[in-house]
Image (cartoon, rainbow, N blue to C red):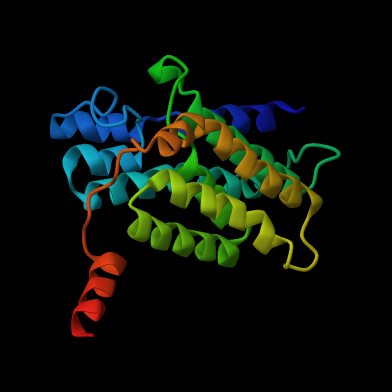
Amino acid sequence: MNLEFFGLILLAYFLGSIPTAVIVGRILGVDVRRTGSGNPGAANMARVTGRRSWGAFVLLIDALKGFLPARLGAVALAALGSFPAGLDAWTVRVILGAAAILGHVTSPVLGFRGGKGVATSLGVVLALAPIIGLVCFALWALMAELTRRISVSSLAAGLAFPALLHLAPNTHPAVQTFAWLVPLFLTFTHRKNLLRLVRGNEPAIPSERLVRNFLGKRNGRK
């Protein structure tokens, strides 16, 4: 492994480890690690502030933490003329994206703890397969509105990713492997959420606008 590639892996990891929800929470005067579900992620930010807008902001930044390394890392290596021997661009993108996700989940800033990796994984998916990533995001948003349980919507989107990618022709093997690891990884990071879902005490996100209100208005007309 050359030094430039190793340096980019570390950069992707530390970029992913930036605790967006914790930083935004401190600006707003709340500690997301001690309120709501205690998870330093977009969903809990929406819960503790009561505003979807703050949750959406955290989701956007966390997604960029995965998107940028997976999208630009291989380009940077090619520009430097130090592409790692034996690896192609797709494999490099997957490795850098995975490093960012790992950084988000095991942030050294938070004592090697972190979020569930959903938003950062979404960013990587959008970098690797943009159209499929947008479909997964749409499914995630729809399920979040209908169930108000981010764990349910995240796992549904995670399972949809490899299923949809299977329909895409000529998908690189590294991307295929990553796609099947995503739902397994999200299931692991959501293991406590799954237990709470079974017990019926999984926290809900605020009920606001979009699909839920749209369906409510339609039902009101009938």
Vertical arrangement, residue 200 with respect to residue 35, above or below: below
Outermost residue toward the front in this view: 199
Which one is nearer the viewer's eye here, 58 or 144? 144
Looking at the image, which is closer to me, 168 or 214?
Answer: 214
On the image, the x and y values in percent for residue 15 come to: 47, 33
Question: Residue 205's x, y, as percent?
Answer: 28, 46
- Which part of the image, by quadrant, shows the C terminus? bottom left
Residue 44 falls left or right of residue 64: left
Q: Is residue 1 above or below residue 201?
A: above
Q: In the shown orientation, is residue 92 left or right of residue 46?
A: right
Q: Number of labelled discs? A: 0
Residue shown at 20% from the left, 84% from the top: 221
Snapshot quadrant of residue 109: top left
Q: Is residue 81 left or right of residue 124?
A: right
Q: Nearer the viewer, residue 153 or 170?
A: 153
Placement of 148 over or under 136, stated as above or below: above
Q: Is residue 39 visible?
A: yes
Q: Residue at horizontal 68%, vertical 59%?
A: 163
Q: Residue at x 22, y 26 (%)?
A: 31
In the rendered image, the residue lying farthest to the bottom is: 222
Q: Position of residue 213 (x, y in %)?
A: 23, 68
The residue furthest left is: 29
Picture quadrant of residue 185: top right
The answer to whether residue 77 is seen in the rendering is no
Residue found at x 30% / y 51% = 56
Relative placement, left or right, of 12 versus 197 is right
Q: Position of residue 5 (x, y in %)?
A: 68, 33
Q: Residue furthest top?
A: 111
Q: Quadrant of the N terminus?
A: top right
